[in-house]
């Protein structure tokens, strides 16, 4: 999926798969249904819509009757499982072809492969036929020792040495060498045994212990100290929280510790012995030796690594989900709306960068003031700010929360303005990334990075979503271990989150930036550029239909995008709503039946309540679609986000030195993790509220208690000035 949510590849069923695989019984619908509790008809219709290049936001919002009211999460899962099914079928084809080329494909093996839809099992079946480097077993086979290995495995002889003596030749000097070669072959068979591998996997999944040992040469390095708890650590892997596993792996990647995953060796060997040893004669001793070798040399390293990778994948997914949840909350943060804003990027020595923005976020004025040390030009700075507020008709002030933020906020609040002004402190995370980006350079080619950064701080107050889509989500500062997780999966998830947020809010077609437009259902980067260029050449859009005049924006793209864009004061009032153009005739008929014009029906609750939805069902739009239309008519174009609220920190707290245990403070939640949340209390260091300190009683999910940017009351529990760590509680 690209960042527009469009399905670029057709993942629908290809009939040729099933002509090539005559004994394939599974269909993609059945495969998905076994993994998701969703009716087969809903799956079938969703797959059909995806194969027609419909985007996930479009399907979720405007094809509810076809999908059975599936939400975006369920549709995304169907999309992923469809892709996974396709990948499995392709992998099976590759495996079958490879084994066939080796003339080793038996009807039994073919059946096992074609009936399996477990990638792990498929790789196990393929393991004996994989191209690999020459093994000890290969060398032993070349020496003619495979028959000896088979005789030992049959476990019928009490004199193995006598058997071995028959296999001496120019390459095999004595019985011991012959027996060693036979054991090497047996070890390889054991490694390839499906039953053994499955049962060892189960053992590792149930009882594996993860352990870390410090690298002694690095123990005393300053950078190593943040990982000190993992210098000598062990715990059951299935109980290790995702954040702790990722921390251990980061410590290993940075060279400070060694990580191992293991089970009790005796239990693993017992599983293997019970699987293959059927007698107590001379053969059994050699099989035991082969078992110990197979486990130590082949099975334990492979399954240990496999188990760790599985745990890593789960930890990655947990971290990615937390990040996506945080990003969603951040993107959907309360906007102030189209106001004239004075934005300040605070600083000491280099001064505070000040920009005045109009309602659309364009620069009216910019300059630098020096109200703080070392210049201390406070009086001059006050006069300047007051003058700018008056001359630019400023309605609100936005201050970045970085260096000198608190001092700048206090300085602003001392100014006696002629009217009430709301003063907001906003997160400036990622502002510097934006200011140096290609997008910023295109938007403000004549201004330096400091001015662009201040603009970003101002625009974030006006519309966080519109501004933050210009920044790589990883730079926004609301995740943990984002650089340690699978980057492809992270990007896909975050892009989908941005797409979902943009389309759930809807965007103003005449003011939206190229960045914002690119995330609209059906549009994408290139089409967004075409829209912006068309707007610049032809002026504001007056109708959604005008989108069709944009070069290369075809009927399909129009269908996917039209309902997610808004046009204020359009010829047709429905163009400023979430009603899809394909339903306009239905709304017009509703109005006509009530003896009204369309614009008279909009927001007319009394008349809308009189409408019988059943009457307007069509072949394309069912009862769910009609009910959605009626909901939208009640509050057309309403922004689902809450309005921005002013927040004030404790004026007496400016640095970590001002804190003391037991102090109760106002704060803002600025990051959420699996183990708790971080709260900004108005100083450089954010404090941690551990999940156990969020409220009385057990908490399984931090998001159940707090949301990003939520205003909270916290109490200081611990202060570690040296490590700059603050422990907080919300249990007051």
Image: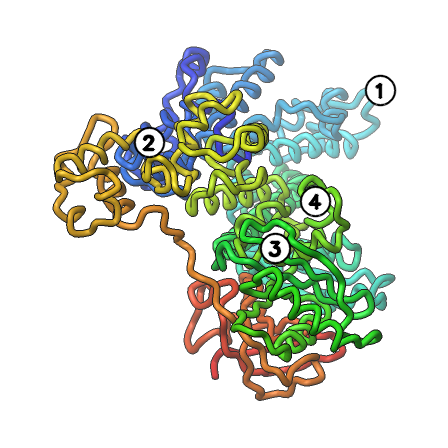
Could you tell me if the residues under marks 1 and 3 are in contact, i.e. CB atoms within 8 Å? no
Mark 3–mark 4 Cα distance, whole angstroms, equals 13 Å
In this view of the protein, which residue sits in the foreground, 193 or 13? 13
The mark that comes first in sequence, 2 or 1, is 1
In the picture of the structure, the residue carrying the numbered disc 3 is 357
What residue sits 48% from the left and 38% below the top? 509
Could you tell me if the residues under marks 2 and 3 are in contact, i.e. CB atoms within 8 Å? no
The mark that comes first in sequence, 2 or 4, is 4
Query: Under tag 3, what secondary structure?
Result: strand
Residue 670: x %, y % from top left: 57, 65
As drawn, the label of residue 170 is: 1
In this view of the protein, which residue sits in the foreground, 634 or 359? 359
The mark that comes first in sequence, 3 or 4, is 3
In this view of the protein, which residue sits in the foreground, 4 or 608? 608
The mark that comes first in sequence, 1 or 3, is 1
Residue 651: x %, y % from top left: 62, 82
* Tag count: 4
Depth check, mark 1 against mark 3: the one in front is: 3
């Amino acid at each position: 999926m690209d960042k527009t949510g469009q399905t670029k590849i057709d993942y629908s069923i290809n009939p040729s798969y099933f002509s090539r695989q005559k004994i394939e019984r599974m269909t993609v619908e059945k495969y998905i249904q076994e993994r998701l509790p969703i009716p087969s008809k809903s799956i079938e219709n969703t797959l059909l819509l995806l194969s027609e290049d419909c985007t996930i936001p479009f399907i979720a919002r405007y094809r509810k009757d076809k999908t059975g009211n599936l939400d975006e999460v369920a549709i995304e899962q169907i999309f992923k499982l469809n892709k996974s099914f396709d990948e499995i079928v392709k992998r099976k084809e590759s495996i079958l072809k490879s084994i066939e080329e080796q003339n080793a494909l038996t009807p039994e093996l073919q059946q096992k492969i074609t009936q399996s839809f477990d990638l792990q099992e498929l790789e196990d079946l393929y393991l004996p036929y994989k191209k690999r480097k020459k093994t000890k077993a290969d060398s032993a086979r070349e020496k003619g020792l495979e028959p000896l290995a088979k005789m030992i495995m049959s476990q019928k002889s009490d004199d193995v040495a006598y058997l071995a003596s028959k296999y001496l030749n120019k390459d095999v000097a004595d019985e011991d060498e012959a027996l060693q070669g036979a054991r090497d072959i047996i070890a390889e068979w054991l490694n390839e045994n499906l039953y053994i591998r499955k049962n060892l996997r189960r053992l590792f999944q149930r009882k594996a212990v993860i352990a870390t040992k410090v690298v002694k040469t690095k123990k005393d390095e300053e950078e190593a100290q943040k990982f000190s708890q993992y210098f000598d650590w062990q715990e059951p892997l299935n109980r290790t929280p995702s954040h702790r596993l990722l921390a251990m792996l980061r410590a290993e990647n940075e060279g400070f510790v060694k990580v191992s995953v293991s089970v009790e060796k005796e239990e693993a060997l017992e599983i293997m012995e019970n699987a293959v040893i059927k007698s107590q004669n001379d053969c059994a001793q050699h099989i035991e030796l082969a078992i110990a070798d197979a486990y130590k040399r082949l099975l334990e390293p492979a399954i240990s690594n496999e188990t760790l990778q599985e745990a890593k994948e789960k930890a990655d997914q947990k971290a990615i989900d937390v990040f996506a949840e945080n990003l969603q909350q951040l993107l959907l943060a309360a906007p102030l709306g189209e106001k004239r804003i004075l934005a300040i990027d605070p600083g000491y020595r280099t001064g505070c960068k000040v920009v005045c923005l109009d309602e659309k976020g364009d620069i009216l004025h910019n300059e630098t003031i020096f109200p703080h040390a070392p210049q201390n030009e406070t009086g001059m700075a006050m006069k300047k700010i007051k003058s700018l507020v008056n001359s630019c008709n400023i309605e609100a002030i936005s201050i970045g929360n970085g260096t000198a933020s608190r001092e700048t906020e206090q300085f602003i609040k001392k100014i006696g303005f002629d009217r009430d002004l709301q003063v907001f402190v906003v997160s400036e995370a990622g502002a510097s990334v934006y200011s140096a980006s290609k997008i910023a350079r295109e938007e403000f080619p004549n201004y330096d990075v400091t001015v662009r950064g201040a603009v970003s701080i101002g625009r974030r107050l006006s519309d966080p979503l519109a501004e933050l889509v210009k920044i790589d989500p990883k730079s926004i500062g609301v995740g943990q271990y984002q650089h340690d997780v699978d980057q492809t999966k992270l990007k896909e998830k975050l892009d989908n989150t941005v797409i979902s947020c943009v389309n759930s809010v809807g965007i103003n077609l005449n003011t939206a930036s190229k960045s914002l437009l690119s995330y609209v259902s059906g549009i994408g980067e290139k089409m967004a550029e075409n829209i912006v260029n068309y707007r610049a050449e032809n002026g504001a859009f007056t109708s959604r239909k005008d989108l069709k005049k944009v070069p290369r924006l075809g009927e399909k793209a129009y269908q996917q995008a039209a309902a997610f864009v808004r046009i204020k004061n359009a010829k047709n009032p429905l163009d400023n709503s979430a009603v899809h153009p394909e339903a306009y005739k239905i709304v017009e008929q509703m109005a006509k039946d009530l003896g009204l014009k369309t614009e008279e029906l909009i927001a007319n609750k009394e008349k809308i309540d009189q409408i019988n939805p059943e009457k307007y069902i069509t072949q394309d739009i069912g009862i769910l679609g009609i009910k959605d239309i009626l909901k939208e008519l009640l509050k057309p174009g309403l922004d689902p986000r809450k309005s921005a609220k002013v927040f004030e920190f404790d004026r007496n707290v400016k640095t970590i030195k001002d804190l003391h245990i037991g102090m109760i403070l106002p704060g803002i939640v600025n990051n959420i993790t699996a183990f708790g949340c971080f709260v900004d209390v108005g100083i450089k260091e954010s404090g941690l509220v551990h999940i156990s300190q969020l409220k009385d009683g057990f908490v399984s999910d931090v998001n159940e208690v707090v949301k990003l940017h939520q205003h909270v009351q916290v109490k200081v529990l611990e202060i570690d000035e040296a490590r700059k760590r603050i422990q907080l509680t919300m249990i007051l």
